């Protein structure tokens, strides 16, 4: 009873932070077929999504740059991309460390890696040859590492594979085998900038490894006994936020931060649901479903709510009702799936949460979040 009262108090006060919101329209968007991929830097938001004709064919990528201070679209471009039919998942959209270059990727057939100028959204170069073979499963494009190299990962055989590519000529800079996962979790939990990866080593424990397979001293052990792993978010070196939940409405968030661990139980099931690199914060979508197994209809979502989680604790900093969105290239979950991850972006004391919705627009929530 004491725990429930504490949780209720925490959740009731988490919504009291100052906030504002506004919308940004998206050209020719259909979120049932393609979700926006987003990145931000220098006060600008960059967004890319495919547009479709009435027969559900697509060969155009709509790319926009928005000023987050004025809420205005500054630039828009239409880029020709490989023609596809039906829903299409993007793997990622990233801004280079120097703020000059954007990279957009679709890493399942037909492949495309597209380099754009951040200044005017014009195409710089592209390739349809990616560093994967048919043996690579659970492919991942993770943007830029600390040296500005493009970063890819997959599972080949029984091992993680980490690949770096030169942005200027698409040549492979490195290709190395990493540790062997004991429990596999989709997606790969990897930080190319810190060159570390986390692996679930038992049903209730995570271990951090260097890319060469040697373990670090960071390990997360937790007590939550119900349900399954729903993903994890790397918050930096030796820092992890992991999500767990049952099939209906019981879940927990566990955190490891520089030798300290913590857990927060929830009356819903949290899933990793954010992108962007904001210190100390990550997002989750928390869902409730019928109290039945998935094969009997228990995976039908009754409600979903976005939780902005602060690593310290962990605690809920802010919450808001939100749709749980995803698109997949096919029914096979290993051929490309994109989640509607809101982008987290900090500007001074404000934290922007840029969220896609079923409508052809982005909603930007601005939260007071002092550093």
Image (cartoon, helix red, strand yellow):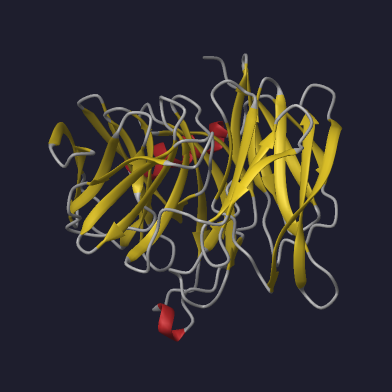
Q: Is residue 279 above or below residue 365?
A: above
Q: Is residue 110 above or below residue 72?
A: below
Residue reaching furthest to the bottom: 296
Residue 163, position in %: x, y? 35, 44
Closest to the observer, 207 or 38: 38
Residue 181, position in %: x, y? 20, 55
Residue 293, position in %: x, y? 39, 79
Q: Residue at x 52, y 63 (%)?
A: 337
Q: Is residue 187 left or right of residue 303?
A: left
Would residue 233 be seen by someone viewing this image from the given angle?
Answer: yes
Q: Is residue 223 above or below residue 344?
A: below
Q: Is residue 361 left or right of residue 2?
A: right
Q: Residue at x 56, y 15 (%)?
A: 370
Closest to the observer, 176 or 327: 176
Q: Is residue 348 above or below residue 55?
A: above
Closest to the observer, 93 or 247: 93
Q: Residue at x 72, y 26 (%)?
A: 44
């Amino acid at each position: 009873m004491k725990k429930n009262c504490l949780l209720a108090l925490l959740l009731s006060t988490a919504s009291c932070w100052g906030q504002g919101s506004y919308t940004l329209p998206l050209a020719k968007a259909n979120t049932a077929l393609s979700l926006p991929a987003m990145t931000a830097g220098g006060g600008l938001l960059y967004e890319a999504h495919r547009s479709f004709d009435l027969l559900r064919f697509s060969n155009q990528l709509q790319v926009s740059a928005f000023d987050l201070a004025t809420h205005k679209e500054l630039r828009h471009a239409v880029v020709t991309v490989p023609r596809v039919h039906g829903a299409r998942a993007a793997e990622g959209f990233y801004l280079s460390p120097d703020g000059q270059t954007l990279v957009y990727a679709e890493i399942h057939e037909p492949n495309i890696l597209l380099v754009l100028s951040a200044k005017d959204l014009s195409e710089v170069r592209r390739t349809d040859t990616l560093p994967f073979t048919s043996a690579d499963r659970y492919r991942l494009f993770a943007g830029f590492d600390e040296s500005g190299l493009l970063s890819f990962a997959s599972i080949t055989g029984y091992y993680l594979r980490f690949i770096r590519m030169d942005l200027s000529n698409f040549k492979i800079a490195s290709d190395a085998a990493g540790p062997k996962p004991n429990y596999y979790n989709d997606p790969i939990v990897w930080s190319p900038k810190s060159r570390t990866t986390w692996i679930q080593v038992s049903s209730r424990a995570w271990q951090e490894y260097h890319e060469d397979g040697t373990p670090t001293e960071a390990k997360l052990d937790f007590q939550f006994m119900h349900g399954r792993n729903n993903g994890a978010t790397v918050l930096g070196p030796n820092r992890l936020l992991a999500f767990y939940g049952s099939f209906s409405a019981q879940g927990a968030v566990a955190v490891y931060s520089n030798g300290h661990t913590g857990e927060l139980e929830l009356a819903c099931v949290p899933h990793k649901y954010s992108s962007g690199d904001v210190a100390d914060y990550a997002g989750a979508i928390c869902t409730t479903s019928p109290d039945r197994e998935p094969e009997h209809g228990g995976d039908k979502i009754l409600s979903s709510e976005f939780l902005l989680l602060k690593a310290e604790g962990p605690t809920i900093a802010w919450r808001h009702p939100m749709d749980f969105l995803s698109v997949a290239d096919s029914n096979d979950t290993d051929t490309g799936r994109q989640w509607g991850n809101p982008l987290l972006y900090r500007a001074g004391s404000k934290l922007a949460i840029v969220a896609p919705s079923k409508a052809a627009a982005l909603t930007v929530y601005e939260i007071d979040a002092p550093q």
